[in-house]
């Protein structure tokens, strides 16, 4: 999501807008399709998250909120 936010959102599929101008300018130097790849990858991650949460709920397990991720007991 951070790469998508840095690169600027190409459309309204992923929440948020903006981008870092220097990053947006440098991204096509790596690959002319890199902005599209980053955007599509983020869209896929949201789809995976939705699928996995639906599966967990179906099995009676707790779902995951990716908005608040804890690492080593810290938020």
Image (cartoon, rainbow, N blue to C red):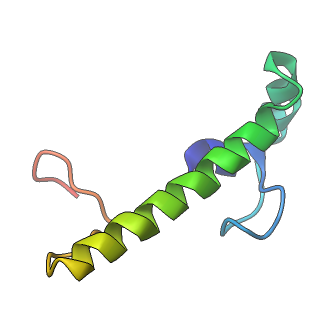
Q: Which quadrant of the figure has residue 10?
A: bottom right
Residue at 62% over, 41% down? 3
State the residue in front, 53 or 67. 53
State the residue in front, 18 or 66. 66
21 sits left or right of 75 in the view: right
Residue 64, placed above or below residue 39: below
Residue at 78% over, 31% down? 34
Q: Is residue 65 visible?
A: no
State the residue in front, 27 or 31. 31
* Number of numbered discs: 0
Quadrant assignment for the C terminus? bottom left
Residue at 25% over, 80% down? 57
Q: Position of residue 7 (x, y in %)?
A: 75, 43
State the residue in front, 39 or 74. 39
Q: Position of residue 38 (x, y in %)?
A: 69, 41
56 sits left or right of 21 in the view: left
Residue 30, placed above or below residue 25: above
Q: Which quadrant of the figure has residue 50?
A: bottom left
Residue at 53% over, 62% down? 47
Q: Position of residue 46 (x, y in %)?
A: 52, 62
Q: Outermost residue, top direction?
A: 30
Q: Is residue 1 visible?
A: yes
Residue 6, placed above or below residue 47: above
């Amino acid at each position: 999501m951070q790469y998508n936010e840095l690169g600027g959102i190409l459309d309204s599929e992923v929440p948020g807008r903006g981008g870092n101008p220097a990053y947006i300018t440098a991204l096509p130097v790596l690959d002319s399709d890199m902005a599209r790849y980053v955007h599509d990858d983020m869209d896929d991650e949201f789809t995976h998250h939705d699928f996995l949460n639906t599966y967990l709920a179906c099995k009676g397990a707790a779902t995951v909120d990716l908005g608040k991720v804890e690492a080593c007991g810290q938020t």
